[in-house]
Image (cartoon, rainbow, N blue to C red):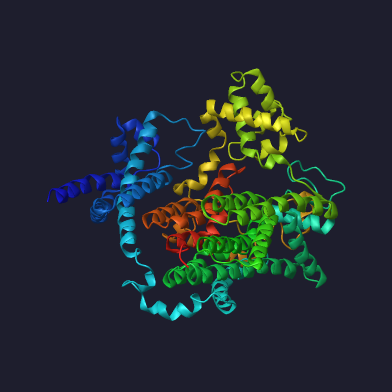
Amino acid sequence: MYRKIAVVGLTGISTFFAWLALTMGEVADSSIKSATTSVMDAALLSISSNGSFSSSLLFLLLLIPVYVGWDFFFKASARVKICTLISSAVLGFSLALSSRNLNPEVHRLVFDYQYIFLRYVGFVILLICCLGFFLCWCEKVLQVKSLSKSKFRIVIFSKLEPFYFSFNAKNVLIISSVVFLFWLPWIVMLFPANIGPDTVAQLVWMRTGKVWDPSTRLNLPGYALSDHHPWFDSLIYGAFDKFGFWIGNEEAGLFLLELFHAVFLAASFGVVLTYLPSRVGVPVELAAGLTLFVALVPVYGRLSMSVVKDLTFMPFYLLWLVVYIEYARRTIARCKIPVAFYCLFISLSILCMLTRKIAFYILLFSLAALLIFIKRRVVTSFLMLALVLSQMLIPKIVFPVLHVAPSGVQEVIVVPLQQSAGMLIEHGDEINNAARKQMLAVYSCSVGQMKSNISLESADSIKDNCFNRKSSKTDLINFLKSWARQALRYPMTCWRYTSWLLYPFYMNSNRIYDEGFFVHWGWEDRGGNGILRQYKSHEKSSNQKIGEKVYTTLERLPIINVLMTETTYVLWIPVISLGLCIVLKRWANLLISVPFLLSIGTLLVSPMAQLRYSWSLLFGAVILISLPFMKIHEE
């Protein structure tokens, strides 16, 4: 009795705060601030500006889910409560914060932070109710051996079992064909090509044999390619481009390049979606739902036609994830692993490293996690050694033969370069002479020149224009030590100059996955206009004009908008998936999340907030969603 009364009282208070969070603006306008004396007054004034009827209706609609959520939360196990509280606290930040209310160029008062905190509290309360109910329900339903054997079984899906419960070429082809069929409208609407500046540069290099450094824009005599963009990708793009000229139709060659990406990506999804239910026990209902998810969510079909290095990497990465999961499963189950499997693992690892440079670190540390937590450590060590040797030896063998110019170390230390430049500009006089000298040793610019070059939206200008390419290894080591020490002294300055690193985690930033609709653009002064001359730079084909209207309309629709937003895949799906693994005690499954957690980590060392940097999380979402349902600990 007393618990029910407590829940009812808590429901009223919680509904009020959740209602505030959903109806308040992101920041209090200046007119609202000047007319109020407290944060609560500002919140209520902001709400009243939206109209009384809609806000009152929302309050009433929130009462029931909040009551049910708290009722489930109090009945939940300690594990569910802890996961709910932690997940809600993390996800609440993504709803309450945004690039607008945390803009480093705008001075905020204590009042503003109180206003933001009030929204945060409301969102956390709402999330506790929603996630508490969801996790409790999952704990009750999914603790059975298989969802397919539970009373919640959806009978219609039994007809699909033959396509998912057998991992063979026929089923992979069928699932791949379904995905590709639903992508066909986007393939047509992106015709003839969707080529950005990075790929334009690679095509020009392959056509002319004349290469330049994209950072400094200086010509590189004696070289035919630059590893600034992966040389392996350049060879692939160049092969299709030359085929187009060979058959006398440049447009056909580049369209086939895009079609190759779409087909290969659909085939990779076919492998993933067939593997998950047949080998690791993912319910057929979920596998079928994920097939429709990949087929129907607009970002997948649309992005499959963007020719850029990050997309070329994606099919190899999806296949590598399947092999990684299978290696973990067989190791835990103590199954024999044939030599051919190891050859496949190493081959896919090399292809991933050749198509995306940062993949080496993701793959290596993912194997390190297996090395620490599961057996077969000697074999895992040899796999790690194979990756390291491949990373070292392939450039030494290939670069001289193909005349590839190596990329610079500045690409790896871009965040320290940007943050150190900011600290030198803001606090140069406060930093001791020894540390200041060590920091300046890796720059070719004076502090004054840094000030004119630096941007709060990207580190490219500092990286490209101010890095001293003659810096020794000792200089770089001393620089990183000084940067780390000074960053502890001036954390807010570091954040101010690299605030874009958090953009992918703000739900309200509304970062929709889209590379833009155009045939080509970039490097016009270097021969970029020679790519499909019938189209000007940034010009859209007639099909793309239609595609842009369709895509723009879809991104404005509720629910679909959320499924097209970066934060959904970077933060929400990983947090909920990991929380559910803990609730269900699927401890071994947490090892499968390591590549994804590392991918999230790479976003924090990026030179800018580009959407394609998080594509590995977008395209890997089918595995992340399936993670709590996997039974890799069972044979």
* Location of residue 431 by image quarter: top right
- Eyeballing the image, is 169 above or below 214? below
Q: Position of residue 248 (x, y in %)?
A: 81, 71
Q: Position of residue 605 (x, y in %)?
A: 59, 42
Toward the viewer: 205 or 317?
A: 317
* Location of residue 176 by image quarter: bottom right
Image side of residue 624 versus residue 219, left or right: left
Res 102 seen here: yes
Q: Position of residue 147 (x, y in %)?
A: 37, 69
What's the residue at 25%, 46% (across, down)?
Answer: 14
Res 421 seen here: no
* Location of residue 541 by image quarter: bottom right
- Residue at the extreme right of the image, as rendered: 222
Q: Position of residue 332 (x, y in %)?
A: 51, 60
- Eyeballing the image, is 544 above or below 599? below
Count of number-bearing discs: 0
Toward the viewer: 211 or 265?
A: 265
Image side of residue 92 versus residue 195, left or right: left
What's the residue at 45%, 63% (across, down)?
Answer: 630
